[in-house]
Image (cartoon, grey):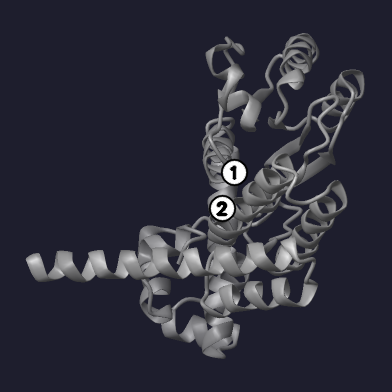
Amino acid sequence: MNATRTLASSAKAARADFFATQVVSFTDAIVRGDHHSAERVVGELLSAQQTLADIYTRVMSPALVTVGDLWCRSDIGVGEEHLATEIVVGQMERLRALFAKHDARSPYRVMIGCVEGELHYVGARMTADLCLAQGWNVDFVGANVPNEALIEIVKGRQPQVLALSITLENGLEKGDAALEGLELAAPALQTVLGGQAVQGKGANRSWGRQCHIAGDAVEGVAIIGRLLRSYEPGAVLKEYQLVLARRVRDLRTRKGWTQEQLAEATAVTRVCIVAVEGGKQNVSMDILVRLANALGVAPESLLSEQP
């Protein structure tokens, strides 16, 4: 038992050291305005099979905090701060293309943006990307969304959840006003707030019954997921069907199997496999176990985006 704990502790320490090194390298690259070095660091993270959440929260976010601190101390100018941010945004676009799961059949829609007057949008964009990686429909409305415009687009697009970022303290009043207007325009809407101002002076505010506070992008996505899955039982079933479809299709492809070969290995018809991979099949526990055994994974892993 002690040996197991020691190994686990060593692995955790090694992982922490790895990320600490990557943060230093990435921060140095973006402060110097070195696009190529920043791209190299992200490439190393991808080669090490790090998750999008870890890349965003354990490398890019700390690097941006350091950039902000350097600007506050006048160690770098506004131009350097903007360049560093744009390098990060460029790498985020690269990662979004790799991790996003675009599935128009998803029953879930999330809207993410920044309150009126808020120009710091990177944290909100990270949250949007992590939601895209879940396969949800995501409307990212960007920075500085006027309250009237926000209410109108919510009414038009009808998301189940709206997530708003407030970084600067002067945005707290705008956030209050936005939520007040949304309660009248979209009473069923669930909202999630995040950002430095929300964690700071906004921590003691009463934001309303249907408003939830997130400490960071990962927590925000977890809250959004919980809200979405409690929204409509039928939607929960559909979401599991789509997750199962993606997992079975991906695992079959990795094995180099055709649908006929998977059908033979699981003793079901090809029509059944086509329906499963199309997200249209309610499978029994028996078929779920057969699929898992044939694909060499645990049954529960077929119902999760995390292998």
Nearer to us: label 1 or label 2: 2
Q: 305 or 112, which is in the foreground?
A: 112
The residue under label 2 is which amino acid type? Thr
Q: Quadrant of residue 80?
A: bottom right
Give the residue pinned by disc 1: 217
The residue under label 1 is which amino acid type? Ala
Residue at left offset 55%, top offset 32%: 214
- State whether residue 178 appears in this view: yes
Q: Quadrant of residue 302?
A: bottom left
Q: Residue 57 got which mark?
A: 2
Give x and y (percent) for residue 127: 66, 45
Residue at left offset 32%, top offset 65%: 13
- State whether residue 281 appears in this view: no
Element assignment for label 1: helix
Give x and y (percent) for residue 301: 41, 63
Give x and y (percent) for residue 192: 63, 28
Q: Quadrant of residue 182?
A: top right
Residue at left offset 63%, top offset 50%: 66
- Residues packed near mark 1 inside 10 Å, few (<14), some (14 to 19) or many (20 plus): many
44 lies above or below 91 = below
Give x and y (percent) for residue 92: 73, 61
183 lies above or below 42 = above
Q: 290 or 21, which is in the foreground?
A: 21
Task: Identify the image quadrant of the C terminus.
Answer: bottom left
Q: CA–CA distance between discs 1 and 2?
A: 7 Å
Q: 1 or 16, which is in the foreground?
A: 16
Task: Identify the image quadrant of the N terminus.
Answer: bottom left
Contact between marks 1 and 2 (CB within 8 A): the answer is yes
Element assignment for label 2: helix
